[in-house]
Image: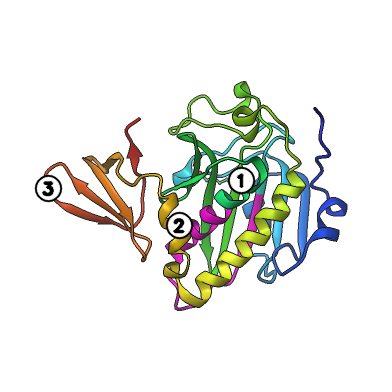
């Protein structure tokens, strides 16, 4: 069934409350929403959204690809407090994204350290945080209305969209509004109290906890995400690793 689904300013700006989404930049097509904000000099809370990215950026130099008008592709500009540990921001955004996905689609969503949102062991969203001159641009890509054959076939983590998971189509403007509300609230909590302030809701969503993982060639079992954002891994050799950043593969 068709749903109302426009990310143009007239669909988004009138319903926005709070700081995130002001100003709101919308481009039907751009290279990457990250590039619309990096070096822009815009205030905290500026948001850039596109219906299609010709050069969408994923983590560790990977591309982020979605057919026009199917995914939610949004970047948020932040001026984080100087006393906060910036790598935690991806977890803050991932928690807010998991909550927005759950609220929209009545699904149980988890956070795969350090930056993915998972449903049914498949990746529905990814976060990319880029730092430039004290400003962080956090990009969120949510697979929303892609059909199965429109999801990347070669992704390192098997993907899903809200549509492939539920058989329904979703209004991306409503999802964006919910995401921005939740991200703003979680960001403010993090600014005031660090990751520990969110941990009660993050800890139970820890996807890797107890799973077999490969931490840079060391096979082991993920123990948990810590309150400082690091991932504890117990290697098969009996060593305890506190992983600060990077890729962790899980064994399906
Ligand atoms: C990942 O999982 O590798 C991170 C993907 C981040 C994709 C989003 S889409 C909006 C923003 N613009 C980009 O070019 N990338 C991020």
Q: Residue 101 carries which label?
A: 1
Q: Would residue 90 be found to the left or right of residue 176 on screen?
A: left
Label 1, label 2: how far apart the Cα atoms are: 15 Å
Residue 189, position as x, y percentages in the image: 54, 71
Q: Residue 38: tell me if it is visible.
A: no
Q: Does the residue labelled 2 lie within 8 Å of ligand 1?
A: no
- SS class, disc 2: helix
Counting residues from the start of the chain, the first of labels 2 and 3 encountered is 2
Residue 237, position as x, y percentages in the image: 11, 44
Q: What residue is shown with label 2?
A: 202
Work out which quarter of the rendered image holds the C terminus and state it: top left
Counting residues from the start of the chain, the first of labels 1 and 3 encountered is 1
- Tell me which corner region of the image, top left, top right, bottom left or bottom right, holds residue 53: top right
Counting residues from the start of the chain, the first of labels 1 and 2 encountered is 1
Q: Residue 222 carries which label?
A: none
- SS class, disc 1: helix
Label 2, label 3: how far apart the Cα atoms are: 26 Å
Residue under the image location 42 percent in, 69 percent down: 196
- SS class, disc 3: loop
């Amino acid at each position: 069934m068709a749903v109302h689904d426009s990310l143009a300013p007239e669909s988004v700006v009138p319903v926005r409350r709070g700081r995130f989404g002001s100003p709101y930049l919308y481009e039907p097509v751009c290279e990457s929403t990250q590039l619309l904000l990096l070096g822009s000099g815009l205030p905290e809370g500026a948001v850039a959204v596109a219906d299609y990215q010709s050069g969408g950026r994923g983590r560790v130099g990977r591309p982020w690809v979605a057919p026009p008008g199917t995914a939610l592709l949004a970047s948020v500009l932040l001026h984080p407090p100087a006393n906060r540990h910036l790598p935690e921001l991806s977890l803050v955004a991932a928690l807010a994204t998991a909550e927005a996905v759950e609220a929209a689609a009545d699904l149980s969503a988890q956070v795969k350290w350090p930056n993915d949102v998972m449903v049914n062991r498949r990746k529905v969203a990814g976060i990319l945080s880029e730092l430039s001159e004290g400003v962080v641009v956090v990009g969120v890509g949510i697979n929303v209305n892609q059909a199965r054959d429109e999801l990347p076939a070669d992704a390192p983590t098997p993907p899903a969209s809200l549509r492939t998971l539920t058989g329904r189509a979703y209004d991306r403007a409503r999802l964006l509004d919910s995401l921005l509300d939740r991200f703003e609230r979680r960001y403010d909590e993090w600014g005031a109290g660090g990751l520990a302030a969110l941990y009660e809701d993050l800890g139970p969503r820890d996807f890797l906890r107890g799973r077999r993982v490969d931490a840079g060639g060391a096979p082991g079992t993920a123990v948990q995400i810590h309150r400082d954002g690091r991932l504890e891994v117990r290697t098969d050799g009996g060593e305890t690793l506190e992983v600060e950043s990077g890729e962790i593969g899980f064994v399906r």
